[in-house]
Image: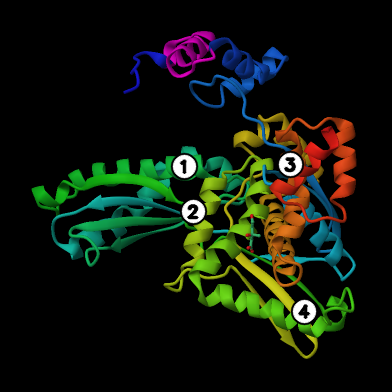
Amino acid sequence: MGKSVSGFSKFSKSKKIDWIVEHYFAANEQVKSVIKKYWNSDDKLQQLHDEFIENTITNYYLPLGIAPNFLINDKIYAIPMAIEESSVVAAASKAAKFWYDRGGFKAEVISTTKIGQVHFMYHGDVDKLNSFFLKVKKKLFEDTKAITKNMILRGGGILDIVLKDKRQELDNYFQLHATFETLDAMGANFINSCLEQFAKTFTEEAKKYDDFSAEEKDIQIVMSILSNYVPDCLVRAEVSCNVEDLNENDALSGEEFARKFIQAVEIAKVEPYRAVTHNKGIMNGIDSVVLATGNDFRAVEAGVHAYASRHGRYSSLTDASLENGVFKFWLEIPLALGTVGGLTRLHPMVKIALELLKHPTAKDLMQIIAVAGLAQNFAALRSLITTGIQQGHMKMHLMNILNQFNANAAEKETLINHFKSNAVTHNAVIEALENLRQ
Ligand code: MEV
């Protein structure tokens, strides 16, 4: 059994490290030295990172890579991607270049509505609750004015609030279901603040509502929280070209490529085991840009996968067609993103990522990120239906294996050359390294 601790959050950073190292590690000084190696030498920058969360002991690096040559709605982007998986950035860059030569990506934002709910229990007459809601609705808007003022000035705010009877799903369960337009902000704080005010106003007003009995006056709020399911905050990304233009080599005609590609998508549409992996590849592209731009990838993940199940079975997020000699491949996903507020104003690398993307609005960023997801899926399917995924993946993974065995610069150069014409496997790399070292 491990050791529990009280007051850990009040320990200084050094004391926190001393405590965990003492209780969880054998090689104390070595572990401490690694933890501290990841501290930034700029104290102010380190303090900024320390204060993003609680109980920070050090930083956790992810590489930030760039996938250039993304032509999106006739503008060229170099897309920043924060991700640890070898081959994702290379695959994105390859897909970007492929479509750059074929007219680029088209993207459009379909809708931008976000959702939040006050979940509550009510024991009583539903008609009375409906009348009460209609009477109090205006006050729900009024009482949030201090929160919504600036957002309204910019053209956003609360769009609507409706009362939902959910008793078919759970006894006595009702909701205030509210919709929001949060413009360039992801809007989590804005939405949650509005919802908490709705809950307050709603319960206070209920107590004063003469038509309610004592029991009806006692509305019990369970919770007030935004939803990360945003099926009305949708973006679409698409590529298309004449089918002959898909042909890259003589081994596979454009027509054959399109046919196999569409079959791969159809499989992901009907087979959940495949759909999850198919969509995981899409999320390689999406999460890495979401992360690089300081957005909440857990929110995006949760919402996107819920959307993939919206017809009752988990299915592909992308679709493809071949009609009248034109190959089309597209993606439609919900994305709630922000380009102002939150980390975007604080994290120096996020600021750089956003500047690299030409200071996008939230709508621009939705389009860029959807394109990154589509490109990633294109690259994955293209490999899967032709060479197989391992060829490209292991080429990129080669460096990880070489690093694992502390290959020096000369060894790396020799072996990278060697594996240009030989299949990369873990054992083959070890063997080649051993031969070289003998
Ligand atoms: C690996 O991270 C992602 C893939 O498995 C996606 C796919 O299979 O489509 C290559």
Side of 103 where 269 appears, left or right: left
Q: For mark 4, give the secondary structure.
A: helix
Q: From the viewer's perspective, tell me whether residue 152 is left or right of residue 178.
A: right
Ranked by sequence position, the earlier of labels 3 and 1 is 1
Task: Determine which of the numbered discs, if any, sits on residue 257 in the image.
Answer: 4
User: Is the residue 141 above or below the residue 378 in the image?
Assistant: above
Circle 3 SS class: helix
Q: Dot 1, crowdedness within 10 Å: few (<14), some or many (≥20)?
A: some
Residue occupying the far bottom of the picture: 324
The residue under label 1 is 145
Which amino acid is tagged 1?
Lys
Quadrant observed for ligand 1 in the rendered image = bottom right
Q: Amino acid at mark 3?
A: Ile
Residue at 47% in and 45% down: 191
The reply to whether discs 1 and 2 touch (Cβ–Cβ < 8 Å) is: no
Earlier sequence position, callout 3 versus callout 2: 2
- Mark before the other along the chain sequence, 4 or 3: 4
Q: Quadrant of residue 103?
A: bottom right
Secondary-structure class at tag 1: helix
Mark 2 residue type? Ala
Our reading of the magenta stretch's main secondary structure is helix
What residue would you read off at disc 2? 302
- Which percent across, then down, holds residue 362? 66, 50
Question: Cα distance, mark 1 to mark 2?
Answer: 30 Å
Q: Nearer the viewer, mark 1 or mark 2?
A: 2
State which mark lies toward you, 3 or 1.
3
